[in-house]
Amino acid sequence: MQSVAATREANAGSGLTERQGVVLEEALRLLVDGGEKALTTAGVARAANCSKESLYKWFGDRDGLLSAMIGFQASKVRTQDPAADALNAESLRRHLVVFAKDLLEVLAGDVSLALNRLAIGQASREGSKLGHMLQERGRRQIGRRAAALLEAGRKAGLLAFDDADEAYGALYGLVVSDWHLKMLLGEEAGEMKKGFGRKAEQAVNAFLTLYGTKG
Amino acid sequence: MQSVAATREANAGSGLTERQGVVLEEALRLLVDGGEKALTTAGVARAANCSKESLYKWFGDRDGLLSAMIGFQASKVRTQDPAADALNAESLRRHLVVFAKDLLEVLAGDVSLALNRLAIGQASREGSKLGHMLQERGRRQIGRRAAALLEAGRKAGLLAFDDADEAYGALYGLVVSDWHLKMLLGEEAGEMKKGFGRKAEQAVNAFLTLYGTKG
DNA sequence: TGCGAACCGTACCGTACGGTACTGAATGGG
DNA sequence: CCCATTCAGTACCGTACGGTACGGTTCGCA
């Protein structure tokens, strides 16, 4: 996963030492492997070969570490909204399918699932600070990419909708359905992934039936 | 919430004393109010005026208590699949809208959210036993109701689909989209609920566009 | 009345965690 | 060469939890 390059990228303008990035990487690994219960300060310190005192100096307290982990991971995910090449019906469909597949694969990723589980577990108390962070820095990114795609489709006369949010909601729902929740609840994601391609195409077909200008 | 009647109902054939039902009710209240962190054995014992020793005698250990809570709550939710009156296009639409609204309101319920958060939090370790339980005893119920409704629609010539699961997945996705996740992450459900009616109708409209036999 | 079962309340134990304090080894700059 | 900074490693403290054990009380029953 070329963690070094990714880490350096993530640190750009985040006030994070490279060492701290490595520590956060190790913390994420612990979280993915063992869930929140396994994410103890002593455990992180041991896994990252640093002292607990350093952890507290860098991140304040445990919650600060959790926030830093979310921000760190979010800063690593760069959603490229490329293209904007002249859209026709077929290229729009292709872009939508790629988007749908990317969405499913992001949601099914180890780290994404672990962080979502973490934020959901903390949602009851503490005003769901982590939840908002995850929502803002994770979802918003991919939402923007979708919004740009939909808007381009509309500008090209290939899509017709009044409310962009509503259209995006339909696309998201058709693509994801209840798979995300099932994975969050522990359903093995392994066998699911092979069906992502077919599922993405079906969802895009349905979406184009609803919002496409030509059947 | 007529908890007494509901409790008595839930105990039918579950090997649960009425006292134990009251204890589970109190445990659910603690979980809803304070999340998993607030659900300690001592806390439950104090809130329910029973001894920790009794808790361990009745439920084995903490995980047994959690399982019992899920089973208890699931047994309280009775999904009536009524109707089966002669379907026409309008009554099918009405039934679908009612189903969609019910689904949204169930998912937005305090106890449902708390139990889903609990199961998701435990999904990393322990083979996600609670997750499977929640999936089986909660989702399966409402899924059956939807399947019956869809099948009736097809039998009446009002719906056309090959794969019932695929159709149900589309309906679920159109109705729920990412609202469930947002609520699980802590988004205030209060202001959302007022939009459920409109959202349900929009989703059903879209679903009928996709799977209805007459536009 | 005597007996046993169920059970509440509480005290108790071992453990594990979050957070703090201390020591000693590097490192680097004057 | 000396001093300041940083940090790893460890020991430590208070707390809180899961789980167990025990005394006292109520209740049903013979």
Image: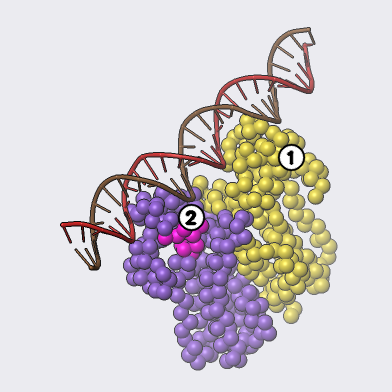
Chain colours: A yellow, B purple, C red, D brown
Residue B53 seen in the current view: yes
Residue A189 % position (x, y): 69, 63
Left or right of A70 in this view: B113 = left
Residue at horizontal 58 percent and vertical 83 percent from the top: B150
Residue ID for mark 1:
A22
Bounds of the magenta span? B58-70
Residue at horizontal 57 percent and vertical 62 percent from the top: B129
Residue B184 % position (x, y): 55, 58
Q: Counting other residues with Cα less than 10 Å from the Cα at mark 2, is it few (<14), some (14-19), or many (20 or more)?
A: some
Left or right of A68 in this view: B59 = left
Secondary structure beneath label 1: helix
Give me the chain letter of mark 1: A
Asked if residue A185 is positioned above or below residue B85 in the image, the reply reads: above
Which is more toward the observer, D14 or B4?
A: D14
Q: What's the residue type where badge 1 is placed? A: Val
Q: Is residue B64 magenta?
A: yes
Residue at horizontal 46 percent and vertical 84 percent from the top: B82
Q: Main secondary structure of the magenta part?
A: helix
Tell me which corner region of the image, top left, top right, bottom left or bottom right, holds residue D1. top right
Q: CA distance from mark 2 to mark 1?
A: 36 Å
Specify whether disc 2 shares its chain with disc 1.
Answer: no
Residue at horizontal 79 percent and vertical 45 percent from the top: A3
Q: Is residue A198 magenta?
A: no
Residue A15 % position (x, y): 70, 35
